[in-house]
Amino acid sequence: MEPIKKHEGLVYPLNRANVDTDQIIPKQFLKRIERQGFGEFLFYNWRFTDDGKEKPEFSLNDQKYVGASILVAGENFGCGSSREHAPWALQDYGFKVIIAPSFADIFYNNCTKNGILPIRLNESNTEELIEKSENRQYRITVDLQEQQITDSQGFSADFDLPAYQKEMLLNGWDEIAVTLNYEQDIADYESSH
Amino acid sequence: MSKPKTIIEKIWERHVVHQEQDKPDLLYIDLHLVHEVTSPQAFEGLRMKNRNVRRPELTYATMDHNVPTKHRNIIKDAISKKQMQTLKDNCKEFGISLADIDHPDQGIVHVIGPELGLTQPGKTIVCGDSHTSTHGAFGALAFGIGTSEVEHVLATQTLWQVPPKSLNVQVNGKLGKGVTSKDLILAIIAKFGVRFGTGYVIEYTGEAIRELTMEERMTVCNMSIEAGARAGLISPDDNTVEYLRGRRHVPQDQEAYEAISKEWKALATDPGAVYDATVVIDAEEIEPQVSWGTNPGMCIPVSASVPDPIHAETTSKKEEIERALEYMDLEPGQRMDTVPIEHVFIGSCTNSRLSDLRRAANVIRGKKVHKKVQAIVVPGSFSVKAAAEAEGLDVIFTQAGFEWRDAGCSMCLAMNDDIVPPGERCASTSNRNFEGRQGNGARTHLVSPEMAAAAAIEGHFVDVRKFTEATMQS
Ligand code: SF4
């Protein structure tokens, strides 16, 4: 996967809690056997009418968010189904960083396996980012090494993430290759069980 | 004496392959279940890197999400068909057992694991499916994973995992008559919220849990993920041992089975073990539940009224309720037992086992499905279907006007042809009432099999306890 170190980009605010993976990528698009090409189906039922026309009232369809690469949302983002098609769709659409006060566990893991940086940010900072981006184009810089989010007007917030995930994301490692370095431990475990 | 431990700690310790500071533990996986939707990209990943499946004999696959439940072999959707064919090809290439679409062992992955005795106490079990928590009913540590992790397990039979925090959900007292384990888990999620389990593994304890049958326990553990917990489990006891006895993948020899049963029961949480958190709920306060909104925490007793957003504590809660009511086309204050329905779905990995079907059949015996309602029963597996037919349940259902289908996920997520049309309402025994889950624009209400059955007859929700009483007298 692509390493992610520092990212500067346009913020798209999705001010909803409990956004589930059924909304991120509806089931009718889970039949494909590839990893690519899910972006056009991202938030499909929110973005499009039954006959495939864009719904102007859904904010992602707003011109000012074209090219957004940082999604900021409410609590418990990515709950529900384990479908990795959800991060694939977000990534394919162009999102590289997702910020929310909390994430569902499986979704969080799935992001880090695909080089998407999920950031757990406290509620007040998240709200501030949402506010600043709701009516205008707003850009921030996310520095993974420093674990810091900044904007050009003096906003600054630190975030936490597990050391292991940080290392994987910074280096873009293939986790299976890493694990295969422990081949002997696995074999030993197997022969003693 | 050594420090008392929870079952979670005991299973964990036995599966650590490698441990080092500032890293998750490398955990060994005993059983990997696979289905057609979340596996193709994982197998493709193996091929691209020229990797193999490390332990095909610990891997077991089935087809469930896409399969048609009538006209079994006519798969109109070419992409679905390709996905199923891909699983078949992958299993063949990598030497994995597969319960194919017409195999007698086919069924929903979380129904057949326990049925075949693949699911056993103390095992670590994963599947690219969030309802893998179901297998926790047997005292296994079972959790859903994404496709990258599926690939990782295929290649290494391990996963990097942070030791979970433990959450004791203690259910005191006894469930009332006509109140099921589905009502219990819905009430738990309604009370504590859809994220109270995030970051935890739940252990369900207490008198009400001990009294549940294994199939009822599966219903509870199944929905742990709806509370945010990746896994939920119950310490094994005599129920567990008796349920698994004689199943295909457990020791058949009696002495060997007694020996392993002893080991299983020793896994139970020790008295005095400490959990990271505990919540308590009283079983006696629980009534039959119906979900009114668009996540499983939005549940109320059937006799209650739809909540009013003006009473919400925060603006974001208020907006969430308003959005849910709009999607569900419900009015604040509307009584749940007046809401009419057009569809009934009895099935899914939550409620499609033999005892679920028996209990629903008992409610409808000799009655007719309401003329405005379309009702289907989808057994969880071929073997559930056969067992139900052997005792005539299919006849009870079809005579009442239900359709009797073949096994699969079906209308739980509507990836096949079993879809609720836009704007229509379904009483469903499944586990998710998310927007569009059963079809774009479809409105899902989660209930127990008994409640779904009673609603099918009445054409609207009704307290199954009153329904049974009234119809017994008439
Ligand atoms: S029945 Fe529904 S919840 Fe269960 S595995 Fe199938 S789709 Fe998932």
Image (spheres, rainbow, N blue to C red):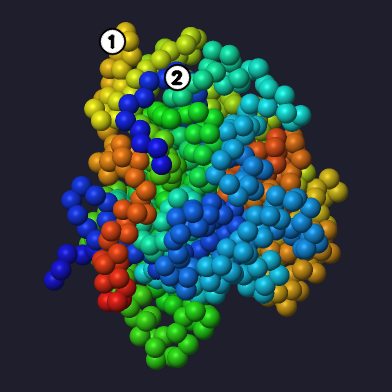
Label 2: state its secondary structure: strand
Q: Residues within 10 Å of mark 1 (few under 14, many from 20)?
A: few
Q: Is residue A102 above or below residue B263?
A: above
Query: Residue placed at 65% from the left, 32% from the top?
Result: A45
Task: Name the amino acid, label 2.
Answer: Val
Q: Answer yes or no: is residue B50 visible.
A: yes
Q: Is residue B163 left or right of residue B126?
A: left
- Disc 2 within 8 angstroms of ligand 1 (CB): no
Where in the figure is residue B408, as x and y percent of width and height?
A: 67, 60
Between A68 and B454, the one lying in front of the other is A68
Question: Circles 1 and 2: CB distance less than 8 Å?
Answer: no
Task: Name the amino acid, label 1.
Answer: Gly
Are tags 1 and 2 found on a single chain?
Answer: yes
First in residue order: circle 1 vs circle 2:
2
- Disc 1 within 8 angstroms of ligand 1 (CB): no
Marking on residue A154: 1
Quarter of the image containing the C terminus of chain A? bottom left
Where in the figure is residue A122, as x and y percent of width and height?
A: 32, 26
Query: Residue placed at 65% from the left, 17% from the top?
Result: A56
Marking on residue B18: none
Query: Residue placed at 77% from the left, 44% from the top?
Result: B342
Q: Is residue B219 left or right of residue B6?
A: right
Furthest residue toward left? B1
Examine the image and state in which quarter residue B473 appears: bottom right
Marking on residue A11: 2
Where in the figure is residue B309, as x and y percent of width and height?
A: 55, 24
Quarter of the image containing the N terminus of chain A? top left
Could you give the CA–CA distance between mark 1 and mark 2, rounded to whole angstroms? 16 Å
Query: Residue placed at 27% from the left, 41% from the top?
Result: A167
Q: Is residue B111 above or below residue B463?
A: below
Q: Is residue B305 above or below residue B13?
A: above
Q: Answer yes or no: is residue B137 visible.
A: no
